[in-house]
Amino acid sequence: MNSILAPTLHQGRSLFLRRTIPSDAPLLYQRAYQNLEFMRLFRLNDRPADVEEVRSRLVRTERHLYQYETEG
């Protein structure tokens, strides 16, 4: 099961890893950034204010990754 939007980085028996993409923002905001235990475990001190802030961070990361991959 490959995603069209983001390539699968590693596939195990029941685990698929892929890069996060901007459309993942609502899920990340609700399940990760709103979970104080998650924030503590991953030592995340910069909680985004809303889903749009998460999305903009992912867009910025995606641009940097694309730029890095095309330069190499």
Image (cartoon, grey):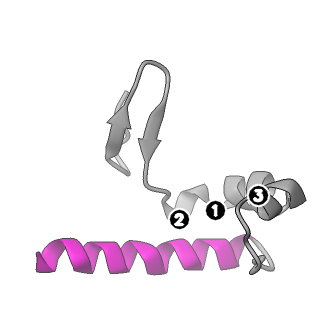
Mark-to-mark CA distance, 1 and 2: 6 Å
Q: Can you give x and y, in whole percent of width and height, for residue 29 in the image? A: 74, 62
Residue 72 image-quadrant placement: bottom left
Circle 3: element type: helix
Name the element at disc 1.
helix
Tell us which disc is closer to us: 3 or 2. 3
Q: CA distance from mark 3 to mark 1?
A: 20 Å
- In what quadrant of the picture does the N terminus appear? top left
- Seen at 60% across and 72% down, the residue is 55
Which residue is labeled 1 in the image? 25
**Three-letter code, disc 2:** Pro
Q: Residue at x 48, y 60 (%)?
A: 21
Tell me if label 1 and label 2 are in contact, CB under 8 Å: yes
Q: Which mark, residue 22?
A: 2
The outermost residue toward the left is 72
Q: Between tags 3 and 1, which lies in front?
A: 3
Q: Amino acid at mark 3?
A: Leu
Residue annotated with mark 3: 41
Task: Return the x and y of residue 12 as percentages of the image width and height.
Answer: 40, 25
Q: From the viewer's perspective, is residue 60 above or below residue 10?
A: below
Please check the rendered image and state whether residue 50 is part of the magenta-colored stretch, yes or no. Answer: no
> Which three-letter amino acid code belongs to the residue tagged 1?
Ala
Span shown in magenta: 51-72
- Residues at marks 3 and 2, CA–CA distance in whole angstroms: 23 Å
Labelled pair 3, 2 in contact (Cβ < 8 Å):
no
Q: Residue at horizontal 20%, vertical 71%? A: 69
Please determine whether, in this image, residue 17 is positioned above or below residue 56.
above
Given contact means CB atoms under 8 Å apart, are the residues at marks 3 and 1 in contact? Answer: no
Q: Residue at x 76, y 57 (%)?
A: 41
